[in-house]
């Protein structure tokens, strides 16, 4: 059981300007699930891509079952029984499962063996309850199913060592559970697994051992049973992380936003909001809890003027702003952190300064005699970067090169600097690592304490419970119930999110 199947010694990898892997010693035991844990940019994918032969290390050695190997290509990795499921799947959409499995196999006469292959795929699929038809086209499959095809591919090629790079990032909680069952079955059968994640709850659930990386270095390897979530967070981030944030007592003031019987349709022409009513006061965070696709996005679009309301009203400080232009809504004091920061929030190819002044380029002091005062703009950007602790390597490089956490910080900084009356934050921490998430949440609480009205829309129930003063649960375009945080029970909210209403049922 304790035999070491993979060992890396001093693996070092440079990219221009970064030391992505700094003398990494790592060991995978036979039959274990070993998690590689680390924040974005810690070097996890780099190390695994080295094991998979996609990158070549500048220094260091790899041993498989005690033998030194040189892995020059994914084919070499395969010959050494290593199979990797990448973050971005490597499947051809227009081909079938069978054809995708066959691709890259070096064996001749694939057409002759087609039926034999289909049989084997079916066998693998049955054994692990994958429920995959070898003749389905990839585009017909859900993301979870495509991931299972990737697993089939590696098993078909005889992988004994499976590497999964952030496999749950693209899955729903239910699909993640299914995947965990599959992984447990695989190790029971003697496979060894390297699992990559930065989500602590799932790491605690699935791992036997955990190796933590930070800034390209190994912080340590621990047994799951010897650690807590807090301990892991501290190893990962390098400092204490608070899973519950300090909240000052609520000082609710006047109502800033009143939403009255609001209705709107989605792009498919289906009614997506059904007589939604709620209010948000200055100094409070009103959280909208719900599973994705229940009208949250449409709601944020209607309030910000990006989508028409078909009936009902949106009132900001006694002024009716229903169906007013987005620009007018912004100038009346509504700022917005949209769900998709690179589509709506930031302009990927513009640089940090240009993105920072998107809200303010058309007025004093940035606009001077009809010209943008670039020096002023740069100074302003630099002040926000410092204040919000944003890591910007080059201020004049396209903003798309920033990490997700830093893009989100920049967006938040820009919107808060406008001193809004109402801030609408949609999934403000989705996809961010622990450190950035904590930072964003603290800023939202800080602004609330200063008297901002915040409408928080999030699918993360922990986030909703951590930040909100009141919670409205949305289901199929309706607010099921509004609950004060003191009375909020996770179970009950979970049921409401699934449409189960204790009164009606
Ligand atoms: N192909 C590449 N070219 C240049 N830099 C890269 C490349 N791949 C990764 N990096 C850099 O190496 C560091 C580690 O990245 P990565 O291994 O992807 O981290 P993780 O998977 O832990 O998020 C980051 O700073 C990243 O920007
Ligand atoms: Mg990665």
Image: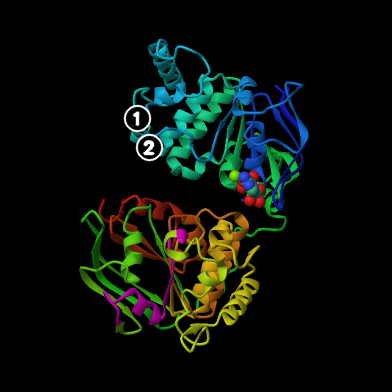
- Would you place residue 434 above or below residue 159 in this image? below
Q: Which residues are magenta?
A: 320-342
* N-terminal-most mark, 2 or 1: 1
**Mark 1 CB lies closer than 8 A to ligand 2:** no
* Quarter of the figure that contains the N terminus: top right
Label 2 sits on residue: 142
Where residue 177 sits in the image (x, y, percent)?
48, 37
Instruction: Tell me if mark 1 has few (under 14), some (14-19) or many (20+) residues whose alpha carbon lies within 10 angstroms of its own.
Output: some
Residue 18 visible in the displayed image: yes
Q: Secondary structure at mark 1?
A: loop
Where residue 314 sits in the image (x, y, percent)?
29, 75
- Would you place residue 1 above or below residue 92 in this image? above
Instruction: Tell me if mark 2 has few (under 14), some (14-19) or many (20+) residues whose alpha carbon lies within 10 angstroms of its own.
Output: few
* CA gap, disc 2 and disc 1: 11 Å
Where residue 159 sits in the image (x, y, percent)?
58, 22
The residue sitting at 48% across, 25% down in the picture is 152
Q: How many marks?
A: 2
Label 1 sits on residue: 137
Choose top left, top right, bottom left or bottom right for residue 112. Answer: top left
Residue positioned most to the bottom:
369
Depth check: give the residue in front, 157 or 238.
157
Magenta span contains residue 329: yes
The residue sitting at 45% across, 33% down in the picture is 91
Choose top left, top right, bottom left or bottom right for residue 213. Answer: top right
């Amino acid at each position: 059981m304790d035999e070491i199947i993979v060992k890396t010694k001093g693996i070092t990898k440079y990219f221009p300007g970064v030391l992505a892997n700094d003398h990494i010693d790592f060991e995978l035991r036979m039959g274990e699930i070993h998690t590689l844990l680390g924040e974005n940019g810690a070097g996890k994918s780099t190390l695994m891509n080295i094991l998979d032969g996609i990158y070549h290390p500048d220094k260091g050695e790899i041993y498989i079952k005690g033998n030194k190997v040189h892995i020059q290509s994914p084919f070499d990795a395969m010959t050494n029984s290593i199979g990797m499921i990448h973050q971005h799947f490597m499947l051809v959409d227009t081909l079938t499962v069978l054809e995708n499995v066959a691709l890259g196999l070096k064996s001749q006469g694939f057409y002759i063996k087609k039926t034999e292959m289909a049989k084997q795929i079916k066998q693998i699929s049955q054994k692990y309850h994958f429920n995959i038809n070898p003749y389905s086209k990839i585009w017909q499959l859900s993301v979870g199913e495509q991931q299972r095809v990737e697993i089939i591919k590696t098993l078909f090629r005889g992988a004994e060592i499976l590497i999964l790079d952030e496999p749950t990032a693209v899955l729903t909680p239910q699909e993640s559970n299914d995947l965990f069952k599959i992984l447990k079955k695989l190790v029971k059968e003697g496979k060894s697994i390297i699992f990559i994640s930065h989500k602590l709850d799932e790491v605690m659930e699935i791992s036997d051992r955990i190796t933590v990386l930070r800034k390209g270095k190994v912080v340590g390897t621990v047994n799951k049973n010897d650690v807590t979530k807090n301990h892991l967070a501290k190893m990962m981030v390098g400092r204490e992380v608070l899973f519950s944030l300090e909240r000052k007592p609520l000082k609710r003031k006047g109502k800033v936003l009143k939403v009255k019987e609001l209705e709107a349709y989605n792009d498919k022409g289906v009614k997506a909001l059904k007589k939604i009513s709620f209010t948000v006061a200055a100094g409070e965070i009103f959280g909208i809890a719900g599973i994705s696709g229940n009208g949250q996005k449409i709601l944020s679009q209607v309030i910000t003027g990006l989508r028409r309301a078909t009936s009902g009203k949106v009132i900001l400080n006694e002024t009716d702003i229903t169906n007013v232009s987005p620009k007018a809504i912004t100038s009346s004091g509504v700022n917005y952190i949209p769900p998709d920061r690179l589509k709506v929030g930031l302009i990927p190819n513009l640089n940090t300064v240009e993105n920072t002044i998107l809200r303010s380029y058309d007025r004093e002091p940035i606009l001077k005699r009809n010209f943008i005062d670039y020096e002023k703009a740069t100074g302003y950007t630099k002040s926000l970067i410092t204040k919000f602790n944003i890591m910007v390597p080059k201020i004049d490089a396209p903003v798309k090169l920033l990490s997700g956490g830093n893009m989100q910080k920049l967006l938040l900084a820009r919107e808060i600097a406008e001193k809004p009356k109402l801030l609408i934050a949609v999934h403000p921490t989705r996809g961010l690592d622990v450190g950035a998430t904590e930072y964003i949440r603290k800023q939202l609480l800080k602004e609330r304490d200063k008297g901002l009205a915040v409408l928080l829309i999030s699918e993360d129930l922990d986030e909703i419970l951590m930040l909100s003063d009141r919670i409205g649960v949305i289901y199929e375009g309706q607010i099921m119930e509004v609950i004060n945080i003191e009375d909020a029970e996770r179970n009950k909210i979970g049921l409401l999110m699934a449409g189960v209403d204790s009164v009606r049922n």
